[in-house]
Image: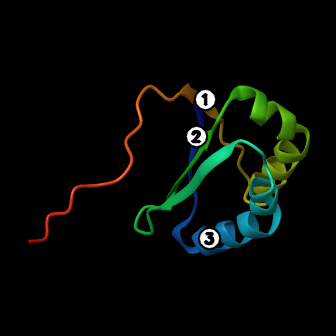
Amino acid sequence: MIARTLRVQVPVGRIDSVLEAYREDVRPIHERAAGLRQHYVFVDRQSGWIEIIGVWDSADDVARIASELEPARQRLWERFGTNPPLEIYEVGDELHGSVSTSA
């Protein structure tokens, strides 16, 4: 598995605009992408930081959708005057589920 991540800071008042633009242009591509296990968009509404993490089965899965995904990703960030770099990591460990603390 691999994880693709990016981190970007936008003006606090633009967070909802970024989320809306993501949902309109990029999310539909993610929804039909084979091999995408999970995708998260984390926001800090106090500081304007956004962190996006996608977990994929393999780099090959990302490569198959890249010709469609990358232009959409670039369009998204051009709308907000930035181009945050993508970072790619191998997933070294994975944990599912949680331990209940209720009695």
Residue at (55, 56) in percent of width and height: 40
- 16 versus 35 height, above or below: below
Q: Residues within 10 Å of mark 1 (few under 14, many from 20)?
A: some
Give the amino acid type for the residue marked by disc 1 in the picture.
Answer: Ile
- Spatial CA distance of label 2 from label 3 is 20 Å
Give left or right: position of 77 versus 10: right
Q: Is residue 16 left or right of residue 102?
A: right
Please identify the residue farthest to the front as the structure is shown. 103
Quadrant location of the N terminus in the rendered image: top right
User: Which residue is the site of mark 1?
Assistant: 88
Instruction: Indicate the quadrant containing the C terminus: top left, top right, bottom left or bottom right.
Output: bottom left
Gap in angstroms between the C-alphas marked 2 and 1: 6 Å
Residue labelled with disc 2: 5
> Toward which corner of the image does residue 76 lie, by quadrant?
bottom right
Q: Are marks 2 and 1 in contact (CB under 8 Å)?
A: yes
Residue type, label 2: Thr
Question: On screen, 91 above or below 101?
Answer: above
